[in-house]
Amino acid sequence: MAQRQRPTSLRDRARYLFDRTLARSTGALLGWLALCCLAVVVPVSALLVWTDPAAPRSLSGRLTAVWRTSAETLRLGGVTGAPLRMLLSVLLGLITLLCVSTLVGVITTGLGDRLTELRRGRSTVLERGHAVVLGWSDQVFTVVGELIAARAEEGGGVVAVLADRDTAEMQSALTPAPGTAPGVRLVCRTGSLTDPAALALVTPAAAASVLVLPAEGADADLEVVRTLLALRAALGARTGPPVVAAVRDERHLPAARLAAGPLGTVLETEVTTARLLAQAARRPGLPGALRDLLDFAGAEFHVVDAPGHLVGGDFGGIALCFEASCVVGFLTADGRALLAPAPGTVLAAGDRLVVVARDAVAAASAVAVDRRPAVDPTAMAAGGPEEREPSRMLVLGWNRRAPLVVDLLRRTAGPGSRLDVVAGPDGVRGVEGCEGRERLAVVFRPGDPVREETLRGLDVFGYDRVLVLAPDPAAGAERPDDRTLLTLLVLRSLEEEAGRALPVVAELCEHRSRALAPLGPASDAVVRGELTALLMAQVAHGPELAAVFEELFAARGGALALRPAGDYVTPGREASFATVVAAALERGGCAIGYRAHGAGGLRLCPRKGERRVWGAGDEILVVTAAPGGSEDARVSDGGRDRVPRMRLSHEGGDSPSGLSLGGSG
């Protein structure tokens, strides 16, 4: 049965008529405004006249008094007499009102524009020793957060951000929670990054460091190069602060480094992400360990002067001389980083120590005390050559970093290893050289990783590791992680169905997707560009660390690894951490922390005298030379270095026309 329609009330009809009239024109709005004013002023004026004992007795006199009161209230003159005189008085009053309103409007507009300009951030930042961040991308949240944390540790400071965005939006998105960064101020300014005049707003010449974030879009790297050139123009002949920048494509590295100048450090996000993915596929738990080591929340890398009495000593003895700091190498007088050198390597005059410590003050003020008496040789595990066992890995998805990931996995895989690849509907690109290798057999299989039937047909639990690659973000795509999240959801359902943990490493494009990713207990996520952002913040805070990180994350240099505690100490035995450090030194590594089985968290820089019972499930975080030495740094395409140097140097090799790409720290 049809429901009877409720009759329309008079109030609803009046509101509809009023709204329809207002929508017609400005004149209608003015008419309604005048009518409303008269409807209020005239009755009140009449009430005032009729209740006044001195009011005229005649009706015409009282109406004249009402008119005069209403006109004075509305500033219309209030002239009485002939109708023409009253009309002219009203006209003159309206003209006066229009002129005054126009003047007030002009003043209000001018003040509003000025306030808007100030709100948009167009005033010059008058600070010294501040950190400047140029650009806006997904890495800005990590970079600014780490810089604020670093400044908070030092007692305060200023972080200035310049981007072509609304200042209020930037301030709201980047401002930390109250009380989390005492003494640190965040200043945001709006302007074009390629305009030297806009760059002058953040006073880069007086800054302690300048960071240029990788841009978004097809011409992202060219935008970074233009920004670096604009920064050079803004600084003029002045030397300027150290500059840290990042690009996405290695083809633009030489130009970016030349534009950054001798004090510039340029990272490449694609190679850095690919190396982290490859290391995470080989070493479970490494992404979390890297985040703990590279953020400013706990222990991190520092370069400190060596005490005079240690000069001439060997690395094996120096590594056991600090109770709460972990020495991992030397920074030579010529700026080269030697990480995890041989125990017999001598500390020369002018060399500095590379240490992992909780803060720079603790690292610099640490007293050298010989901790070798705390070493228990009987608790050390029997050392032997490390053998690479064959492994089975599965790659789901494909992107422009995938060929490099496959190549890195091939160079570190044990003989007889196999890598299955399910690329998805977009197919495989850049596979030249990925197949037919001795150590790693690469097999491409059809299917779509987001479809459950594809993953069920792969026997995913038969693989040692599953690597989920995020697709390259399409132009205008707002949610590039959708396919990755769907794949992870299917894998998680297979885990719950089988009751078994599946070791998965997932690549994500946005840091916001980490909270949404359905990861199992043995899974981890790598956010694209997050490691680059952490490295940028670390290098900006300590420019001398550029050489250290170049060795740490370049294929030809050192590497981080989580290894079983049983490789260093006998499981079930109680031993000090100094014993673990000594055992790691004998095997060509530097132990800097451990993760107890089932504890989840990583403990960095434990005291050398700390004793505990080491279990078979415990893991040791070590800095060690890359497997296979320097040969692993080369690829088949003419031996070209796939992980080029971060800075300009005078050794040649990475730069065009023999010009070296680097500079002094």
Image (cartoon, rainbow, N blue to C red):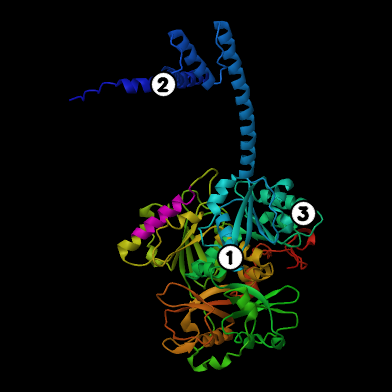
Can residue 263 be seen here? The reply is yes
Distance from label 1 to label 2 (Cα)? 58 Å
Which of pointers 3 and 2 lies earlier in the amino acid sequence?
2
Question: Residue 126, position in %: x, y?
Answer: 70, 54
Q: Nearer the viewer, mark 3 or mark 2?
A: 2
Residue that carries the numbered disc 3 in the rendered image: 235
- For this rendering, which residue is in front, 455 or 193? 193
Report the quarter where the N terminus lies: top left
Marks 3,2: beta carbons within 8 A: no
Report the quarter where the C terminus lies: bottom right
Distance from label 3 to label 2 (Cα)? 61 Å
Hey, which quadrant is residue 353 in on the image?
bottom right
Q: Amino acid at mark 2?
A: Phe
Height in image: 117 above or below 560?
above
Q: Main secondary structure of the magenta part?
A: helix
- For this rendering, which residue is in front, 29 or 456? 29
Residue that carries the numbered disc 2 in the rendered image: 18
Q: Secondary structure at mark 2?
A: helix
Name the disc covering residue 599, or none.
none
Distance from label 3 to label 1 (Cα)? 28 Å
Residue that carries the numbered disc 1 in the rendered image: 152
Q: Secondary structure at mark 1?
A: helix
Height in image: 494 above or below 233?
below
Q: Which residues are magenta?
A: 479-493
Hey, which quadrant is residue 554 in on the image?
bottom right
Residue beneath the point at 48% across and 60% down? 443
Residue beneath the point at 31% across and 20% down? 10
- Crowdedness near tag 2: few (<14), some (14–19) or many (≥20) residues, C-alpha within 10 Å: few
